[in-house]
């Protein structure tokens, strides 16, 4: 055999990567049951493109649910070192329109529209001591971070703490135990509220507290804390960390809860300040007034209009809408592509009107 030909055939092929501005279609290649109410869905590019993302980031999906298109953000739970596909992990939620649809209908071979990777919940490169703190399905982005550390063998000191309703609700329980056994610098703590179904539970139970954190992580003030979970869980974690001496610069959290209206807007006087514009939502046959100092989303929420939203600061893209007429001052943080802007789309959460508007919502 020709040596030159053999060397050419063995040479690694340059991978083509997913382009967040141009690519928007994914195909499901695997569905895996994690717990009784949690599934993981793995997606790949139909063209075989690879994915470049940071552990802790997410994708914004558009799902065709019935006659509607529903947008949702789901954190990547897989390691960024495995670039040919990525996985999101979703908990079935009571009356959850999209989560239930995913559990019941998403199957291998199904195509979906998506945008990403997005988000800033990523670990600082300079840190070497971490507390990865998660509650319930909030484990997904921190699991990606831990898997990343496991794949790269980076010398870090990690305390991984995962809280859940009961032992059977501990997502990735077996894998976490295996990782903690293989990665000698990882200390693992599970904290179920109750031990229903597992009366021989060997560890502590209850909710996170300052007393528990002092026992589990006595040097927490020296660590970078990364937290994701339900809003009450994160509020408690934030307070506890601050009380135990964690600087605000060392506390990082992620959340996909419903949009919160800016405090400055809540405290604003009832009399509109600034120039007032009429904003029409064509599908809901509603008109509201929005000043040039207010975001479209905040006023729509106050008026009871239905617009899906998550981050409220132009990162996730969940509230993306068609601007039929008018113009806005939009200051987004990556949640919308330039070609979508060129096609007339905008993000109400970070847009203030410059004229009367008609929005297809």
Image (cartoon, rainbow, N blue to C red):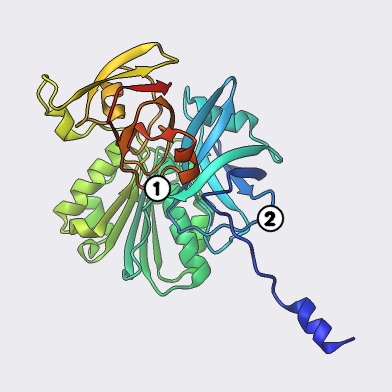
Residue at image location 55% in from the left, 41% down from the top? 114
**Left-right relation of 246 to 103:** left
Q: CA distance from mark 1 to mark 2?
A: 24 Å
Q: Quadrant of residue 233?
A: top left
Q: Is the residue 262 above or below the residue 40 in the image?
A: above
Viewer can see residue 146: yes
Between discs 1 and 2, the one toward the N terminus: 2
| Mark 1–mark 2 CB contact (< 8 Å) | no
Which image quadrant: the C terminus?
top left
**Could you say which is closer to the camera, residue 3 or residue 86?**
3
Q: Is the residue 7 above or below the residue 220 in the image?
A: below
**Could you say which is closer to the camera, residue 114 or residue 223?**
114
Mark 2, other Cα within 10 Å: few <14 / some 14–19 / many ≥20: some
Give percent across and percent down for residue 249: 21, 59
Give percent across and percent down for residue 306: 38, 20
Question: Disc number at residue 48?
Answer: 2
Question: Disc number at residue 64?
Answer: none
Which image quadrant: the N terminus?
bottom right
Residue at image location 40% in from the left, 37% down from the top? 165
Give percent across and percent down for residue 175: 53, 56
Residue at image location 45% in from the left, 33% down from the top? 344
What residue is shown with label 1?
A: 334
Give percent across and percent down for residue 5: 83, 82
């Amino acid at each position: 055999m020709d040596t030159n030909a053999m060397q050419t055939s063995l040479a690694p092929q340059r991978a083509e990567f997913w382009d967040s501005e141009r690519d928007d279609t994914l195909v499901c290649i695997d569905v895996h049951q994690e717990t009784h109410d949690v599934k993981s869905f793995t997606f790949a590019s139909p063209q075989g493109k690879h994915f470049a993302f940071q552990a802790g980031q997410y994708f914004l999906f558009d799902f065709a649910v019935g006659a509607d298109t529903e947008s949702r953000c789901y954190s990547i739970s897989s390691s960024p070192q495995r670039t040919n596909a990525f996985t999101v992990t979703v908990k079935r939620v009571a009356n959850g329109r999209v989560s239930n649809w995913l559990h019941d209908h998403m199957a291998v071979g199904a195509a979906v529209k998506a945008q990403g990777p997005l988000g800033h919940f990523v670990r600082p490169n300079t840190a070497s001591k971490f507390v990865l703190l998660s509650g319930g399905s909030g484990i997904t982005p921190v699991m990606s971070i831990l898997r990343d550390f496991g794949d790269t063998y980076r010398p870090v000191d990690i305390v991984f703490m995962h809280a859940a309703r009961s032992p059977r609700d501990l997502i990735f329980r077996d894998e976490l135990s295996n990782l903690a056994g293989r990665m000698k610098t990882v200390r693992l703590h599970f904290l179920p509220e109750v031990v229903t179904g597992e009366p021989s539970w060997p560890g502590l139970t209850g909710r996170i507290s300052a007393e528990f954190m002092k026992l589990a992580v006595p040097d927490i003030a020296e660590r970078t804390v990364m937290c994701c979970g339900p809003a009450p869980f994160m509020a408690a974690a934030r307070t506890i960390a601050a009380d135990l001496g964690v600087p605000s610069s060392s506390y990082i959290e992620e959340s996909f809860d419903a949009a919160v209206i800016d405090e400055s807007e809540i405290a604003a006087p009832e009399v509109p300040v600034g120039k007032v514009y009429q904003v029409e939502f064509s599908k809901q046959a509603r008109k509201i007034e929005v000043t040039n100092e207010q975001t479209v989303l905040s006023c729509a929420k106050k008026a009871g209009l239905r617009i899906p939203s998550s981050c409220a600061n132009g990162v996730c893209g969940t509230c993306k809408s068609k601007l039929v007429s008018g113009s806005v001052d939009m200051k987004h943080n990556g949640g919308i592509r330039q070609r979508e802007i060129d096609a007339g789309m905008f993000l109400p959460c970070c847009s203030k009107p410059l004229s009367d508007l008609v929005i297809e919502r």
